[in-house]
Image: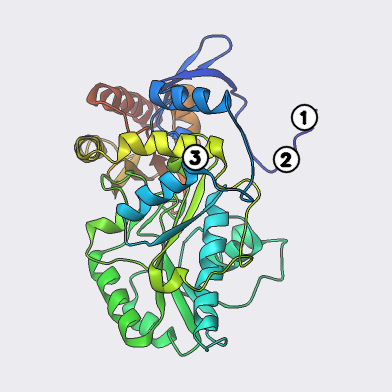
Amino acid sequence: MSAVMKTYGSSEISFERGEGMYLYTESGDKYLDFCSGIAVSALGHSHPHLIRALKEQTEKLLHVSNLYKIPGQEKMAKRLVENTFASSVFFCNSGAEAVECGIKLARKFHYENGDPNRFRIITCSNSFHGRTLATLSAAKQEKHMAGFAPMLDGFDQVHIEDIEKLEEVVNESTACILLEPVQGEGGVVVTSNHYLEKIQQISKSTGALIFFDEVQCGIARTGKLFAHEWSSVKPDIMSLAKGLGGGIPVGACLANEKVSSAMKPGSHGSTFGGNPTSMAAANAVFDIVEKTTFLKHVQEMGKYFKESLVSLGQETNVFGEVRGMGLLVGIVCNITNTDMVKELEDNGLLTVAAGDNVVRFLPPLITEKHHIDEAVAILNDVCRQLST
C-alpha cells in the first residue's frame, strides 16, 4: 500500500524519462504528452537550454533565502517588468501562493489608502485559483470546498460575462475583480474582449482593482506572453506560475506601481520563493518564450490544432464544440470526459479533464505540426472505437 496521501486519483502509469514531446515508462512505453504536467512543461522534456541552466546553477548554489539579494531574481523581475504593466514582482512557489499574494496586495492597497473596509473580491463562476482556503473561497466550487467549511468571508461571485450582475455587485467594499482571461480548469472558456473592456470601465469608475490570474494561460500559452494581451486591458495585479519554471516550482505575483507601493518589508514573504535554482529555470524559460518568433510559432500551431479538431469534430458524434486559444485547447465531450482521457491514455496520448465535461489539450509549446497530426490521429482512432 502506498504511503502517499490519497489526494489524487492518479493513473497507474509512471514515467522514467522524457524527451521533447514524449514521456517514456521504465518498460519503454512511449506517450505523446499533450498534458505538460498541466501546462507546466512549456519547453517539453529535457530541453537542453533549461537543463544546462539548471546544471550550471545547481553546481554552484541551490538556496540562500530572501535574507540576501539573489541576482537571478533581480534579473527575472526586471524582465517581467519590462514585458508587462508591472513595476515589481514577488516570487513564490506555486499558482495558489501567487493568487494569495495578489489577494493580500489588493486589500493592503486599500488599507494603506485609508479604506480598510474595502476588502471584498469579486470572482467569476467556474473559476479556479488554487487549493488554499482563500483560493477555494474565491472560486466557490462546491466539489473543491466540500469538507473544508467554513470558507473565508470576503468573496462575491458573478457569472462570467454577466456585466449587469457585475455592475450590481460592485460597491464601496470591493477591493478588486479577480478573473482568468482564459479559464482552464473551468472548461477552457475564453473571456471576451468586450467583457474585459467593461471590467476596465467599472474599475475606472469605482476604484476596484483588476486582478488577472494567468497561472495557466500565461507564459506564451495562448500565443502572447500573457493572455490578456489579446485585449487592450491591463490589470493592476497578475499571478503567474506553471509554465514560468518549465518544471521547477516557480510562482510570481506582479503589480503596478500604485499597488505594489502598499507593500513594505515584513508585509509578505516566502522561504523558498525566488531562490537561485528556481530563478535559473525561470530565466532559461523566458530566454525562449519571449522571442517574437516563438510566440508566432505558438499562434500558428494553435490555429492548426484547433482547425484540425474542428474538422474531426464534424466527422464524429463523440465530441462537439472546440474551445480555446493558442495551445490551451479543449473539446466538449458527448461521453464522460474522464472516460475519454483514459481512452486517449490507453492509446498513447496524455490529456487532462476540465470542467463542463471538457478534455484539455496542453501540449508543450515546442510542438510541431507532425506532433499535432499524431495527436489528432490518435483522437480520431479513439472516436471511431467509441462510435462502434
Q: Residue 192, relative to residue 271: is it above or below?
A: below
Callout 1 amino acid = Ser
Q: CA distance from mark 2 to mark 3?
A: 31 Å
- The reply to whether the C-beta atoms of the residues labelled 1 and 2 are less than 8 Å apart is yes
Callout 2 amino acid = Lys
Among the two numbered marks 2 and 3 on one chain, the one whose residue lies closer to the N terminus: 2
Q: CA distance from mark 1 to mark 2?
A: 9 Å
The residue sitting at 57% across, 26% down in the picture is: 60
Image coords of residue 244 (percent x, y): 44, 42
Q: Which of 130 and 104 lies nearest the eye of the viewer?
A: 104
Where does the C terminus fall, quadrant-wise? top left
**Callout 2 environment at 10 Å: few (<14), some (14 to 19), or many (20+)?**
few
Q: Which mark is residue 2?
A: 1
Q: CA distance from mark 1 to mark 3?
A: 33 Å
**Callout 3 environment at 10 Å: few (<14), some (14 to 19), or many (20+)?**
many
Image coords of residue 96 (percent x, y): 56, 55
Q: In front of the other: label 2 or label 3? A: 3
Q: Which mark is residue 6?
A: 2
Q: Secondary structure at mark 3?
A: helix
Where does the N terminus fall, quadrant-wise? top right
Q: Which residue is mark 3?
A: 279
